[in-house]
Image (spheres, grey):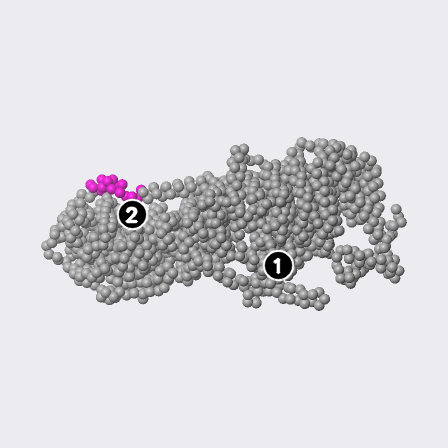
Amino acid sequence: METVLAFVIGGLYAAAIYMLLRRSVVKLLIGLGLLSHAANLLIFTAAGLTRGRAPVVTAGAPAAVIADPLPQALILTAIVIGFGVTAFALVLVFRVYSTLRTDNLDRMREADA
Amino acid sequence: MSHFLLNILLALTWAALTGGFTPANLLLGFGLGFLALQVARRPLGQTGYFSTLPRMAAFVFFFLVEMIIANLRVAADVLTPRWHMRPRVLAVPLEAATDVEITLLANLVSLTPGSLNLDVSSDRRVLYVHAMYADDPELVRRQIKEGFERRLLRITRGLEREDEP
Amino acid sequence: MSTGGVTSVVFGALILAFLLAFVRLARGPSLPDRVVALDLMATLAVGFIATYAVATGQALYVDLALVLALVAFLGTVAFAHYIEKGGRSWRRI
Amino acid sequence: MAAKLHALGSVQPPGVITALAILFLIAFGIKAAIFPLFFWLPASYHTPQVEVSALFAGLLTKVGAYSLIRVFSLVFVQDTGFTHTLILILAGLTMLTGVLGAVAQYDMRRLLSFHIISQIGYLLMGLGLLTPLSLAGAVFFIFHVSVAKTALFLVSGIIHRTAGTYDLRRLGGLYRSQPGLAILFLLPALSLAGLPPLSGFFGKLTLIQAGLSARSPLIVGLALGVSLLTLFSMIKIWNEAFWKPGPADAAQAPGRAKPGLLLPTAILSALTLLIGLGAGPVMSLAQRAGTQLADPGIYILTVLGSAP
Amino acid sequence: MTSFILTTTARLLMPLLFMFSLFLYARGHNEPGGGFVAGLVAGAAWVLYALATDAAQARRALRVQPQSLIGWGLLAALTSGLIGLVLGYPFLTGQWIRLDLPGFGAFELGTPLLFDLGVYLTVLGVTTTIVFALAEE
Amino acid sequence: MIIASVAAGFGAALIAPVVTRWLRHRAGWLLGTLPAALALYFASLIPQAAGGSATTARLTWVEDLGLSLSLRADSLSLLMALLISGIGALVVVYAGGYLKGHPALGALYAWILAFMASMLGVVLADNLLVLFVFWELTSITSFILIGFHHDNEQARAAALQALLVTAGGGLALLPGLVLLGMAGGTFELSELNLQAARIQSSPLFGPALALVLIGAFTKSAQFPFHFWLPNAMAAPTPVSAYLHSATMVKAGVYLLARLSPALAGGPAWAFSVGGIGAATMLLGGAMALAQTDLKRLLAYSTISALGLLTLLIGIGTPHALEAAMVLLLAHALYKGALFLVAGAVEHETGTRQAPLLGGLARAMPWTAAAAGLAMLSMAGLPPLLGFISKELVYESAFELGWPLAVTIALTLAFSVCVSGVVGLVPFWGRPKPLERHPHEAPPSMTFGPLLLGGLSLVFGLAPGLIDGRLAGPAAAAALGAPVALKLSLWHGLTPALGLSAATLVLGLGLLVFIRLMRTRLHAALRPWGSERVYQAGLTALNLAARGLTQLLQSGYHRRYLTIIVLTTVAAGTFTLMRSGAFNWPAADSPPGYYELGVALLIVAAAVMAVTTSSRLGAVAAMGAAGYGVALIYLIFGAPDLAMTQFLIESLTVILFVLAFHHLPPFARLTTVSERAGDAALALAAGAMMTALVLSAVGVQLYPSISPYYVQAAESLAHARNIVNAILVDFRGIDTLGEICVLAISALGVFALLKMPRRKAEGAPTPEADPQAETGR
Amino acid sequence: MAAYLSAAFMLIGAAFMLIAALGVVRFPDLFMRLHASTKSATLGVGCLMVAAALQFESLAITTRALAVVVFLFLTAPVGAHVLGRAAYFSRIPLWDGTLSDDLRGHYDASTHALAGPEAPRVPLPEEVDEEQGA
């Protein structure tokens, strides 16, 4: 499954990067969203996969095999921060568009200052 | 509805007494409690509870059956290559008046035979539905009005509406 | 008890359903069609979670189903909100 | 992190770790604006309000640089021959491109923004050398650059407020009209160029000592050349904004800045001088930090020693 | 959106969702849930309400400024850290007390719960701030 | 006390503007008392130093870097310190007259005093790094002083040039000093000078020597760095007199002398120092002849004298060093005086052009007297100090053979000629018509040159005042061994005396024909100016900077992103390829078919997000991918993650949907080939990431700490959900930071949406857009 | 017993889910797809939840499972309603085989108010400005 997921991650990255390279800012936002999926999945996979057991200690007896909690905590943080970033980027693009009336990144450079 | 609460309390007591909070035991407790209340209906005073609850149960049962039938019809249509449906968008006059009633009715309509609630007119007197098998629009209207609306209203409006239909 | 066999059949059906829903998501043709597909996918995920809980015997996943059931609805409402507000503008997309 | 280090040090094949290290380098490198990933910086730093960019200048890239220092002194130390050489090369290129970018600018804030990049190069140099002394230099540098850069951005803000522009070609005569401001500019500017006895000098001196003891003359030479170019571009600001006679049209006669505006700048400018004059204690702090960074064992001991 | 069906449903669902979020928060320490998820669910409740009615109405219904929720959340999280500090432990060291309520059994109260509450409030505030602001556009 | 003497200068610099506002141009007399007092103090240290025991002081500064503030006053230091403080006093007084009424006089005083203190620091420092600190301070202060007339563009350019050259040299000096310290094992000069053997056998010696020499040569205006000095004549004359003849330019010479015990002895030293010195000496002398501007003339002649000093130090014999020390003193006295005289002349006549001046002796008798004394000393005529120093120079030169002596004699003949042009012709030559009627300069301006000229005479007549007490021990310090110097006016009939006579004759001859030679000489020496190299360098630098910046900062964000991605892919692929980092995961678990289905779903959704032409379709696809990812979390034991992912996914979709009301539809803005290129790049990046994940799978990042968390969760954190325990307890600070980030982003969103739309018209104002003007 | 019941419910649920998905793919217009997704999928999930409840036999789980079912029964139709209504506004075409449309012409395009069936039909805007909107 690790192999499969590796390819999934590669696919997500490729899609995200392709979208990031578009000139339309809206596509860039989509790319950003995909990128965070890819990154989270990357950490998740690289840290090792454990089927089934959630990292919850059943009262009294610790389970024998449980998923590694630390990367999970890490990814949880990453997901939520990704949300904040996406929201911010979205609104930024929104403001830029309402100010400049273009969604073409290449045309935004004149307003660089 | 205070009887309903009482009934639940009784069920909980039963479960506590028997020492098992399993669903089955609770259900049993509820049933026994209902019986107990039935027995004690006089001291407690007359309410619509004892007629509403069975009616409610009957309604739920009816609804589930309708729903399964509806699904089977959809399934049949999905699984066979030819379309059998005769869709229409229909206006169904409403008797239900309160927000909750209309909402409930609309939801139930959506979940059951071949009809899907689209909207309610702004004056809340007409329900527009999309019906899948509506060769005869009047039949659909009647099904909704007779099958659902009446039963629903009987429950929500309790005793005073009981003799009305 | 053949729970393992049953759940794997159920999983298969659900995944098949997922992919079918995705077909609708990809084909459209209109935005509401896609939304229906997405909504269905969420519902399927709820089912998936329930099945998963049964398959692994871990009850805690049922809560997940609850969260998801709520959330799927929200997405649909938001999309509908957009479609209605935007009028026919989606067609210009 | 301590545990991470244990794990990475013992079991893993170094190749993958190195690849991971490179990705970390790129990720934090974007944040820290190192070559060739610094594009976002000059374009963005001069966009917001000057107070904001002053804060950003002091802090933001330093966060990236700090992360880099943390990760590359603690975790990714298996293949230093490759990773840290790469960091050194990047350090050199970052310094050079940053300072050349600054030299080309005529907008004061853009110019200062580019200097942020070149200063990051110095930080990287400290990291790339990876000796206690060089890390101390990097730590000291973070401290120094934060102060000096913020002061400079604030000065540019005051100039904008009083003279109405950031464009060096349209500025002038400020030495005469605001001699106090001139001093407030000169101190951090010269500090940035690494002239003694200001804070920047000691950072530079540390890095040079470290570089020479690590037998890396090339990066030392580059660092020195870049500091000359830094001086050059700072003097450019000085010449254009302060010494050059003011603009011909007297309509834009620069006003004087209010004391309230000058005070924070004055404090920061004085701080660069004080850090320089009192460099002893600051440097021994930095030295201790550098020693700890260079010897992760201490860190592991502190974390794991107290945790379980 | 003017569908009163949706509005009615939203009114019905809101308390439900809110309860559920509290539930998730309360047992987050022992089973999946916790401040993040609970805050998101509570946020979702308000988002639903904002979508079903409009942002202004939701804002009125919320009664407090979403931004101040963020502030309170951060404050709560900080306070939980400071408690440990005051008692002479490192910042954010968890402190627990055991409450024995007759009839209800033992409860454990600790600063991590306060911290989690801070997370909850912050996430709720963030979600509502962003969505309300966007919906008002 | 020594430390206080240095600090006093800086302190005086701070109060100088205040004092000047109070006393105006008379402030010079008051401010001049400080350097004068310092001079007396240093003079009082002479006997002790001549006895071999230097006065020292020490403060700790930055011990971690081997930098302690240690000062040491031996004879060599005292010789310099006396010059600095003594001439400093005169210059301060002089400046009051010269710049009477100038609004920035106070600032000038401040900077001059600061410079003086820095210079004292240089010569008194006993620590290489402290020396460097003060060395750079002199560069900065001299920069400000040269640019004193900063309204003048030439002055600004000259100041920049001087700073770049001297500070650039300083930047060479710094690593040189560090290397030297490393080679000698100490940064303390007095200890270092005892380590000559160790240093010279060190592999660091070569680079250290080269770098130190570059530093010294730039400061002392040695060829090929000499060009900044004549340009620095844009400074006010007192500054030129002080910095550019008596003190700062001698810092390089001082450094050479100071370090010669440690560095001298080998052929490298002799040839580089001696060779450069000789070249500078000749070139400076010859170029001086080509000048007409009095100050430039003096500047070139100073270059020449500095070359001679360098040459002598390069020779390094006891006699040569003795000669160097006496010459150092003599030159400071006469050249300082001549500069001040030139300033007085300019002040009174309004010009510095030698050909326009003549017959001023009648109008300015005191100035003329001072000029005469200085001129005679410079020409090397008895009974002045210049004569004694010249004789010593010749004698030491003869030790190395007559060709060297003759070369020096030629240079000194140039010097004789220059002294005539500056000190003789303007005063006693044929009177010329002048625009302004000259008067005698004010006493503040005649006092200095007269005193300096007088001292030349006094020391010439009574060389016993300096030989055994000052010059001798100074030479001993430079030599690192005792010398017995006995100076006298009359040496007897020696070859040196003959050569002196020849020099004089030749010099006078040149003076007669100078007008004929000037232009031709000027043209002939032009290629040696090396200033054009500097100018070309500046131009090239600006061009390179602009070109590079345009290349790297195109302003197209997409291009930046492309570069970032390219860098990542290239670096990642490279590191994966090298040392066989790539390998298939060892612990690959066979995938369940429904897991495969989920994987397929994610990939399909990603593909759809890319290919769809409907933006909300893309959002929906992104949501589908998110659901898939959440299912993966679910399957692999992360219910918290799955839950959060589901929630966030839906909220994100809602945000997009809400914002898309106001956003434009997808547009296809790129060409097919652009898209193909991007796609290739994206696929490469994806492949790289795949390879990375494949290799990294099973790299257990946290194996030793997770079990700890698992065990501690219930006991320490009172929690059974370990993920939550980690979030709110073990790594609470991270979470705190995280919610802060969230809060900031939310407030950012709020601010962005609620802030007033100022630039709604969309056109950035030209003010705010510097790029529009640079045409980029 | 419970296990077998649970298995049966699961299979039924899965079947309905599959049918829902098939319906969403196969049905010719949006509204019929909504039928499929609302009815079949909700029922399918309900079955699966019941199966889970049967499997665990604990009050807490049962309550939650039932909560999910109730929740879905409450929300799915509302979702379908808002979507269908919105779709109608954006003039998603009905299937050619649709026999009649009572709703047609009763929406007020600007206020989104909906009149009863007795109100006169308003000529549809799209018949006028079909091409102008683009």
Residue in front for this viewpoint, F432 or B67: B67
Residue in front for this viewpoint, F652 or D296: D296
For residue F645, say whether it is visible: no
Viewer-side label of 1, 2: 1
| Lateral position of residue F294 relative to residue F395, left or right | right
For residue E22, say whether it is visible: yes
| Lateral position of residue F67 relative to residue D145, left or right | left
Vertical order, D280 against D172 (above or below): below
Q: What numbered label is drawn on residue F225? A: 2
- Estimate how packed mark 1 is, as few (under 14), some (14 to 19) or many (20 or more) residues with alpha carbons within 10 Å: some
Q: Where, by quadrant of the figure, is residue A73 drawn?
A: bottom right
Q: Which residues are magenta?
A: F516-532
Disc 1 to disc 2, how far (Cα)?
78 Å
Residue in front for this viewpoint, D168 or F524: F524
Indicate the amino acid at tag 2.
Phe
Q: Residue at x 52, y 50 (%)?
A: F699
SS at badge 2: loop
Task: Determine contact: label 1, label 2, CB under 8 Å.
Answer: no
Indicate the amino acid at tag 1.
Pro
Q: What numbered label is drawn on residue F762? A: none
Q: Residue at x 58, y 61 (%)?
A: F712
| Disc 1: which residue | A62
Q: Position of residue F533 (x, y in %)?
A: 31, 42
